Amino acid sequence: MHRNLMTLLKSKNGESITVRGGDRFRHMQYIFIKVKPGIVKVWQSYSWRSLNDIKKTKPAIATLTKDKIVFHLQLASNRSHWSNENKYDIWSMKGLLSLNLLYDVWYCHRKGKHLLRYDSSKEKKDILTLPYNRVTFNWHGDMISEIPKYIVKEYNQWDRDRKDANNVDARARYAQNKAEHAFKKHRDKGTLDEWDPKDAFKLKNVQVRQQAIEAVGLENVLKDCPTEVIDKDTVDGRPYELLEIELPALPRFSKRDSHMTQTKKCLYLKMTNPSTGEYHLEGVARKSDNSWDHIPEETVIGALAWRDGDDVERTGLIGIGGKKTDKWSYNNPVIIT
């Protein structure tokens, strides 16, 4: 391909080469056109468009000379201001790089970012950077354009966030393993009375956490958690309560995770078996927990309706006589004998 391009650079104006490249599931067609003496420009090509139409409607993706290749990256049109996506659209460049135009230059994806990576012969190491508007390489694969300061700043911030996130994950794994080891140690030695029941919240493994709750009892796990009864009701002779329980804070692993130290008030539907006195807690989502799937109102009936998927999208129910009712509809389950 490189030899063909060098030949095209020496040809007469208007000569062209059409090739196909792509990245993963994206396939792209490119057309290389000799536009001036010693200059070839590259456009993304479509078989149903003429050359003049392509040149008028689409900007050139890259400019080639005998010494270098300049990539013209466009701003990403679908990038959300709150997202972690790249500022510039890199798909056209990735497709060109798939043609093996440059030695040891490629893209990689890490932590939500597409990064440009190349082997620097000058610094004798691989260099990572975020893509920018006019990325320029010589034909040996060395970047000869200066990386803009705002790109360096954005990359350094991303790299700092990445390292902080890795540290948080490592500390979380360490705390989790430590808590799990402590529980199993006390369980195997029969000394669970010396184990703090609140440490059950530190157990990320659901199976181990369930074993801990069964071993020490749910009452002991929640005994120091502030609890408020939001609503009480009796349905089919069974007592229900809607509880708001303030759960303890998660461990703080870094300065960036100050929000992890805040306690969280959660809703639970308490269901008691009148025969045995045993009870079961089931989590109920508030709107702040899930904006599209949440309890319609903070009552026992509302929690039961949400749990069973009964009329949770209706905002006002019409009762007997055409008057609005205060309670949400709840259809009792059919008992199968």
Image (cartoon, helix red, strand yellow):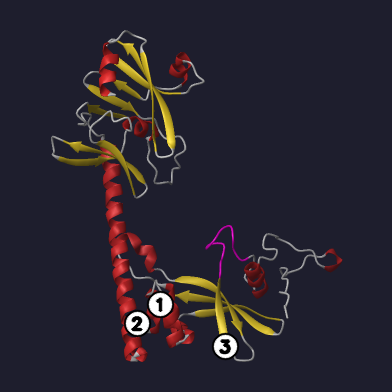
Q: Quadrant of the N terminus?
A: top left
Location of mark 1 (residue)? 208
Q: Residue at x 50, y 76 (%)?
A: 245
Q: Residue 278 — which label? A: 3
- Tell me if I can see residue 212 in this picture: yes
Q: Residue 183 — which label? A: 2
Residue situated in front as seen by the camera: 305 or 121: 121
Q: Which residues are magenta?
A: 284-295
Q: How many marks?
A: 3
Q: Residue at x 56, y 67 (%)?
A: 285
Q: Is disc 1 placed on a helix, strand or loop?
A: helix
Residue situated in front as seen by the camera: 92 or 285: 92
Decide: is 289 above or below 69. Answer: below
Q: Are marks 2 and 1 in contact (CB under 8 Å)?
A: yes
Q: Amino acid at mark 3?
A: Glu
- Tell me if I can see residue 254 in this picture: no
Decide: is 151 above or below 254. Answer: above
Q: Amino acid at mark 2?
A: Phe
Q: Residue at x 20, y 41 (%)?
A: 126
Which badge, 2 or 3, comes first in the chain's sequence? 2
